[in-house]
Image (cartoon, rainbow, N blue to C red):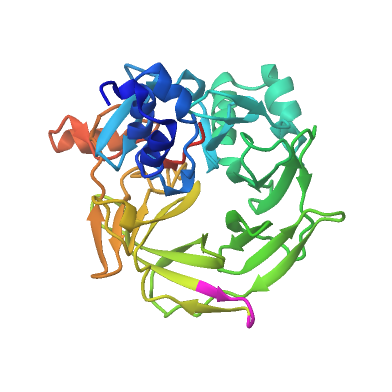
Amino acid sequence: MSRWSELPPELLLTITQKQTNYVDYISIRAVCKSWRSAIPKRPHDLLRHLPWLLLPYHKNSPNHRGFHNLSDGKTYFLEFPQAHEKRCCGCSHGWLVMVEDTPSIFLLNPLTKARIELPSLSTFPNFPTEVVYQNCRNLNENFNRNVKLRIRESYIRKAIISEDPSMVTNFTVMAIYHTVNDNENLAFCRSGDHSWSTINETSPGPHYKDIMFHAGKFYVVDDKGRVSICNTDEPSSMIHVAESPPVPPKMGYKQWYLGSLDQDLLLLGRFRNYGVPNYEYQTRRFVVYKLDASKLTWLELDGLDDKIFFLGWNCFHSISALDYKNCKGNCIYFTDDNFGVCSDFPWEGHDFGIFDFDDGVIKRLGLPSYPIKLPRFPNIYFFERSLQRDMSFFILPPPFWVTISP
C-alpha cells in the first residue's frame, strides 16, 4: 500500500487497541484526517492506561499545569486555567471534584474542560455561609480570607463519583466532610439535586478517612480500619461490613485506604515514621488485606503479583504491569496525602514514592524538582535556602493521580 492514509480502519483499530499510553494514542489520531475519523476519540479500554500525576503550577505560569506521564517519563505542560486557585478533593473516571474559596464545588474534566456544577457547599449542615460569605464585612479581611482558604483546603476531605459523567446522566457523588465538632461525616448528592443529603450516623464522633464505589455500592473506612457501606436509600444509613484487621503492635502511625482487585474489596494500610530528621514524616511500608466476603474477615496478601497500585488521598487505580515495559509489578505507587496539615507537619509535599513488595523497599518516584517558592508557611522556604539549593523536593501542593476520560 503506497499511502498510509489508506490503511483499512479495521487495522488501525487493532493497532490502537494495543496502545497503553494515551499520548501515543492521540498522536496516532493526529496523523491525518482519515486516521482521526477511523479511530474513536475515547480509547476502548481506559482502565489499561496509566494514570498521570497532576503537578502544581509554577508561580510564573499559573494557567498551566504539569501532567507527568510515567509511560515515557515526560511532563506535559497543558493550559489549564480552570484549576487555578482551586483544590481537587477527588478524582473518579477522569473527572476532578474541585472546590473554590467560594461555596462552589463542581466536576471538571481536565482534558475536555467540561464542567458540571454540584450543589453548593452552603447546603451542608452547619456550613458558615451567613458569617463568612454574607456578613463578611463584619470580619477582619485577613481573618475572612484565611477562613475561606481553610474551607477550600480542608472542608471536603474526599469526594468520589459513582459513574462516569461522560457516559451517563444519572450519577451520585459521595463526600467526606468536616463537621463543627471536627468529626468527618458523609454526605451525598445525585445529579440534578439542589442540595447535599447527609448519611445518618449510628456511632458518635466518626472519623472517616477513605471512600470508594465498588460493586454498585459506596464503601467507607474510618480511622480505626472499620469498613461500612453507605446506604443512600431513604432513610440513609450505615451498614457495618467488617472490623479492622489485626495489626501488629508498634507498627507506627497508619492511614487506611480502600481499593479493589477484580471483584474483591481491599483494605490497604500505610505506615509512617514521624520525627525523621528534616522531614517530620516518611512512609516506610504498606500492608494489603482482602475481604473474605463469606466470613467478613480480612486476609493479608503477600503481594500483588503482576499488579501495580496507584494510591493517594484522592484516587485508587490498579493495572497489570504486563502491559508496560517500564513499570514493575507487585508495587504501590503512592503520593503524599498529608494535604493541608499546615502547622502540625510543615514539610508536606515530599512523601511520594514506590513501595516494592519483593524487597519491602521504598524507592523514590522520579519527578521534576520545582523552583523554590514561598509557601503559606515560610519555614519550608528558609529550610531549602539553608541547603543552598534553588530546586525543591517539596512540591506544594502535593501531586495527585489523574485518570483520563476524553
Nearest the eye: 1 or 188: 1
Q: Where residue 11 sits in the image (x, y, percent)?
A: 38, 37
Against 13, residue 241 (above or below) is below
The answer to which image quadrant residue 377 occupies is top left
Of 345 and 227, nearer the camera is 227
Which residues lie in the magenta part? Answer: 290-295
Instruction: Give the camera-side residue of 131 and 372.
Output: 372
**Does residue 325 appear left or right of residue 124 in this picture?**
left
- In the image, what residue occupies the spot 17% across and 29% down? 390
Where 200 sits versus 146, above or below? Answer: below
- Point out residue 12 in the picture as x, y percentages from the top left corner: 39, 34
> Is residue 156 one of those drawn in magenta?
no
Q: Where 209 sits versus 138, above or below?
A: below
On the rendered image, what quadrant is the N terminus found in?
Answer: top left
- Magenta residue check for 293: yes
Can residue 103 be seen by looking at this rendering?
no
